[in-house]
């Protein structure tokens, strides 16, 4: 399987999912029977779930936040920093992950389309806060400005992912699209590869197993992101 060499004239978009953080010790979603750390997605990842039981939802995301503080980026995250360093403004990393590990690894051109564990915002006035600045002993932390409840800065099911205009703008100029560690189940992210391919991009997949949308992948590399990506960096990019 001979992939054309990727040159400095290419524009590279990388989409990552939970699989890239697996080797850092964070569980993926669909490998755990549709449960997220023993919770139903409807209970902890929907606006309705938050309205029904905000204490439970806050407890859940505080735990995820603390878990993310305890883990480190892995070789896969660092390989993506290497690609960004080579391609600079001809590179965009879009992640569905909320753990912040890409940023900690040093990625700069990164869009966290499903939000992030490290921040929260007011349900009324939308003021933003870092979790490290608020008292996490409170079951439902209130806003300092208006006193209304804060909520995690996570894009829940039924909500619009962040920075979609920027993503679609970048997709229009993408010539190489690489999907890493994502099951291709959740839209709109699962659709990006289709769009890139329709625009004429070559598409590459890196995953332990073929994802749902694998018919859109031109070149598939089966394996752990932390093992496959350093090889790709060595062999594919010039
Ligand atoms: P999934 O859990 O659905 O998929 C993870 C994928 O990573 C699977 O296809 C695994 O085969 C693969 N995988 C596991 N370990 C890997 C490794 N070491 N190297 C490479 N691949 C590996 O996670 P996502 O596709 O990210 O949404 O899920 C998408 C969204 O659904 C998430 O962002 C989340 C979830 O519900 C929200 O929270 C809004």
Image (cartoon, rainbow, N blue to C red):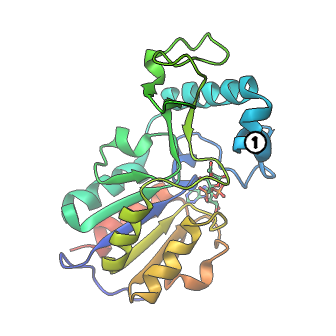
Q: Is residue 221 above or below residue 63?
A: below
- Place residue 47 in its image quadrant: top right
| Placement of the C terminus among the 4 image quadrants | bottom left
| Residue 202 drawn above or below residue 45 | below
The answer, for residue 121, to whether it is visible in the render is yes
Q: Quadrant of the N terminus?
A: bottom left
Specify whether 170 is left or right of 58: left
> Disc 1, ligand 1: is the CB inside 8 Å?
no
As drawn, is 134 to the left or to the right of 63?
Answer: left
Residue under label 1, please give it.
48
Q: Residue at x 61, y 52 (%)?
A: 159
Q: Where residue 78 sits in the image (x, y, percent)?
A: 35, 49
**Residue at (65%, 49%) from the top-left corner?**
28
State the residue in front, 20 or 147: 147
The residue lying toward the viewer, choosing from 81 and 147, is 147
Location of ligand 1 given as a quarter of the image: bottom right
Horizontal and vertical percent for residue 56?
75, 26
Query: Which is nearer the eye, 106 or 222?
Result: 106
Residue 195: x %, y % from top left: 48, 80
The reply to whether residue 37 is in sight is no
Residue 6 is drawn in which quadrant? Answer: bottom left
The x and y percentages for residue 116 are: 49, 40
Residue at x 44% of width, y 29% of height: 127
User: SS class of the residue under badge 1?
Assistant: helix
Label 1 packing within 10 angstroms: few (<14), some (14-19), many (20+): some
Q: Which residue is at the front of the view, 168 or 77?
A: 168
Q: Is residue 232 left or right of residue 138?
A: left
Number of marks in picture:
1
């Amino acid at each position: 399987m001979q992939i054309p060499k990727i040159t400095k004239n290419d524009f590279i978009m990388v989409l990552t999912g939970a699989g890239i953080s697996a080797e850092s010790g964070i569980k993926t979603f669909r490998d755990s029977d549709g449960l997220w750390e023993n919770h139903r997605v409807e209970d902890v990842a929907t606006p309705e779930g938050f309205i029904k039981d905000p204490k439970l939802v806050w407890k859940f995301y505080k735990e995820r936040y603390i878990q993310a503080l305890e883990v480190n980026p892995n070789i896969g995250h660092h390989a993506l920093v290497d690609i960004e360093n080579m391609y600079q403004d001809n590179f965009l990393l879009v992640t569905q992950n909320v753990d912040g590990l890409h940023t900690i690894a040093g990625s700069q051109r990164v869009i966290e389309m499903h939000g992030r564990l490290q921040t929260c915002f007011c349900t009324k006035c939308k003021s933003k806060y870092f979790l490290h600045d608020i008292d996490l002993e409170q079951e439902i932390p209130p806003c300092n400005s208006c006193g209304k409840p804060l909520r995690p800065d996570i894009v829940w099911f039924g909500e619009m992912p962040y920075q979609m205009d920027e993503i679609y703008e970048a997709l229009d100029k993408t010539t190489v699209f690489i999907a890493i560690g994502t099951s291709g189940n959740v839209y709109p992210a699962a659709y990006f590869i289709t769009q890139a391919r329709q625009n004429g991009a070559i598409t590459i997949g890196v995953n332990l197993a073929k994802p749902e949308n694998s018919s859109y992948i031109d070149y598939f590399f089966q394996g752990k992101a932390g093992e496959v990506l350093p090889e790709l960096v060595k062999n594919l990019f010039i």
